[in-house]
Amino acid sequence: MSNALHTPISEQVVLVTGGARGLGRRISEAFLKEGARVIINYHGSKTAAEELAAAHPGRALARQADVRDRAAVDALIAQASQEFGAPLTTVVNNALVDFSFDGDARPKAEDISFRCFSEQFEGAVGGALNTVQAALDDFGKAGFGRVINIGTNLFQNPVVPYHDYNAAKAALLSLTRSLAKDLGPRKVTVNMVSGGLLRTTDASAATPEPVFDAIAAGTPLGSATTPEELADAVLFFASPWSRAITGQNLIVDGGLVMN
């Protein structure tokens, strides 16, 4: 079982939720570039998912499932494992429930309802819990597992009023740590990668350019993080290089927020 912890990315089967567009697409592409077999999960982006899968025949599957639906996630993983002929080894929880990163359009403290929080919690926390629970049997067959949750630096530096999104991602960090403690004896690592505002994804397309410029100016590196740069950090947590790391939150934002 110790050898399983050294399994290279090229021998892994990876599920990327919300893996067809934006950051998720960049993560899917990064794993495919390293030789992994990838399940590109999508909710509504069928065309984008199928186009990406078609570009990598035999190594990519486009599969629809709402991560909030446990039965749908169970079916997705079972079907993909059968098609690939190998168990799932890595889960990247990237799916985002309908959210636009436009600070001016988001409800402020006096207006936001708890329903907004519930929707984000169901997607971020509920979705991650569903995928991890559904993957445990496959992790057992593989002898190890990798879970990488996508977070944000905004709950440590809440410069915009994304109250519901920030709270859900903070809860996801708590789940990351508690799952890491619980699943460690099964050789399953659980970590989080947290970006800032990424330049640019579908979700951040509504953000005005001066905001990106201001963020870049406030970082030691003088630049806003790209989706590709964050995807590189996700690869690290899936690789054997991180085999002794679990329960951690790595912030990838050019040094804007320092732990």
Image (cartoon, rainbow, N blue to C red):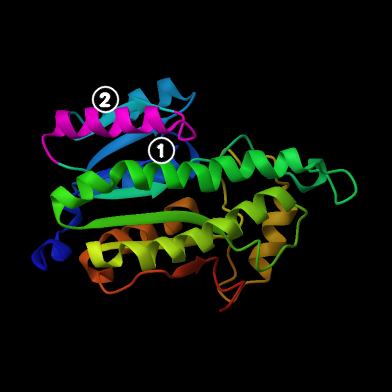
> Sequence-wise, which precedes: disc 1 or disc 2?
1
Residues in magenta, as a range? 66-86
Tag 1 residue: 19
Tell me, yes or no, whether the highlighted magenta stretch contains residue 12.
no
**Residue at the image position 69 percent from the left and 59 percent from the top:** 213
Q: Secondary structure at mark 1?
A: loop
Query: In the depicted view, which residue is nearer to us: 19 or 130?
Result: 130
Left or right, residue 254 beside residue 129: right
Q: Tell how many labels.
A: 2
Identify which residue is drawn at 19% across, 49% down.
Answer: 12
Residue picked out by circle 2: 54
Residue sitting at 45 percent across and 61 percent down? 176
Looking at this view, name the residue that lies furthest to the right.
110
Residue at (45%, 58%) from the top-left corner? 230
Closest to the observer: 33 or 178?
178
Please determine whether, in this image, residue 221 is positioned above or below residue 169: below
Label 2 Cα neighbours within 10 Å, binned few <14 / some 14-19 / many ≥20: some
Residue type marked 2: Ala
Q: Secondary structure at mark 2?
A: helix
Looking at the image, which is closer to me, 189 or 71? 71
Q: Is any part of residue 13 visible from this angle?
A: no
Q: Whole-percent x and y of residue 42?
A: 43, 30
Q: Is residue 79 magenta?
A: yes
Q: Quadrant of the C terminus?
A: bottom right
Q: Amino acid at mark 1?
A: Gly
| Placement of the N terminus among the 4 image quadrants | bottom left
Residue 114, position in %: x, y? 76, 43
The answer to whether residue 191 of the structure is visible from this angle is yes
Predominant SS of the magenta segment: helix
